[in-house]
Amino acid sequence: MTYDTIRETADAALMPTYGRFSVALEQGKSATVRDAEGREYIDFGSGIGVNSLGYADPEWAAAVAEQAGRLQHISNLYYNETQSLFAQEVCRATGMGRVFLCNSGAEANECAVKLARKYSEDKYGPDRYAVVTMNNSFHGRTIATLEATGQDAFHAHFLPFTGGFRYVQPGDVPALELALEGACAVMLECVQGEGGVKPLDFEYLRQVRRLCTEKDVLLVVDEVQTGVGRTGRFLACEHAGIRPDVVTLAKGLGGGLPIGACLCTEELGGVMSAGMHGSTFGGNPVVCAGGRVVLSQVTAPGFLEEVARKGDRLRSRLEKMPGVRSVRGLGLMLGVELDGISGREAAEKCVSAGLLVLTAKSLMRLLPPLTITDEELDRGLSILEKVLTDCGGKEE
Ligand SMILES: *Cc1c(COP(=O)(O)O)cnc(C)c1O
């Protein structure tokens, strides 16, 4: 099909919930992808931080195909070796005790909220149910995770919510202390992704940890975007040296297949018992087969150091470009503040020039595959530099 036919077919059949770019992608390798007309793009977005090993990683594709050809799904009524091993490996990689497997970040966060409420109810009765989240956070699109998301813009049109969420300003410790009264959990992102790639202050994160421990409130760290090596550590919270009670993962964990994981400490492992939570597709063997390859590559010696090195290289090149006001973020999760042009406008121009980038608020957001080569990184940077130089020229 040509691009026009693909677009018309989609626009007639899909709900128009996305602001799409004018391109239809067909085939990729590493961080390079081709469209329906055979044009090539360097991908600095990874399908929103999902394709952690890039397109068509041979080991990943073989493992997924092998599992699909053998046993694609069994439900959680039975055991399966691929799921067992993946669960063990994801617990090891994060240093957590137990995991619940689901299909998305929102679902992983839903599980975290249920777990925190159940934990608190068991110990303190039913009145201690509030979940404290941060202003400018993003936790998902379901009714509860939308409510957890501390941005009014996302809340419009979908009221009433279920209740039981409170918001605090990151960095404001006294406000947090107040909010913790009657709370069962604090949920936060170490780097707010959708909120504009804003890292939370490490000292603040340590204070949150201290207060949560003092008040026996669970600290849930939403690592859906930051986790699985994205920031140069397996979990972003390792940068601040904090140990969460609950961690949620999704985006990059499956290497391109839908997955979510809610991990907790060994002590919390039995809070939810049989029948209290579930997911038909959760822990699907094909998805777990892909996830096992992601985990084995990301935890291999030297891999995270490479992510950090490429992140530094990307950042230092970006900081020298015309029209770049500032760069923030960690590892290969970067937000670029531009002068005189919105992230969206810049992203449109990049697509036309052969580079895929993301946006977050008014920023340009970059989440390249963790395995991107230096050569692809440099090609992408050259395209970006040309786009930004051309923008600067027209502006005067
Ligand atoms: C993307 C994201 C989510 C939602 O994940 P879905 O898989 O789209 O449900 C939740 N939290 C954070 C931090 C995210 O970046």
Image (cartoon, grey):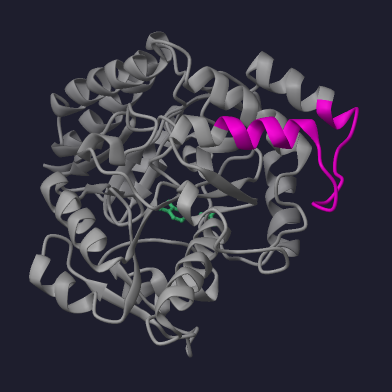
In the rendered image, the vertical position of residue 379 relative to residue 231, given as above or below: above
- From the top left corner, tell me how far across and down residue 22 is, in percent: 55, 45
Instruction: Look at the image and give the residue range highlighted in magenta.
Output: 67-89
Residue 315 visible within the image: yes
| Residue 50 in sight from this viewpoint | no
Report whether 260 appears left or right of 327: right
Tell me: 60 left or right of 311: right
From the viewer's perspective, is residue 348 above or below residue 230?
below
- In the shown orientation, is residue 44 left or right of residue 339? right
- Residue shown at 24% from the left, 80% from the top: 181
Instruction: Compare residues 207 and 377 and report the one nearer the observer.
Output: 207
Looking at the rendering, in which quadrant would you find the N terminus? top right
Q: Nearer the viewer, residue 387 or 229?
A: 229
Q: Residue furthest right?
A: 70
On-image quarter of the C terminus: top left
Q: Residue at x 67, y 69 (%)?
A: 276
The quadrant where residue 172 appears: bottom left
Residue 72: image quadrant is: top right
Q: Give percent across and percent down for residue 221.
A: 36, 52
366 horizontally vs 255: left or right: left
Q: 58 or 348, which lies in front?
A: 58
Q: In the rendered image, which quarter is residue 385 located in?
A: top left
| Farthest-out residue, bottom | 160
11, 66: nearer the viewer: 66
Is 292 contained in the magenta span?
no
79 within the magenta span: yes
Rendering coords of residue 141 (x, y %): 51, 66
Residue 130 pos. (x, y %): 36, 79
Q: How many marks?
A: 0
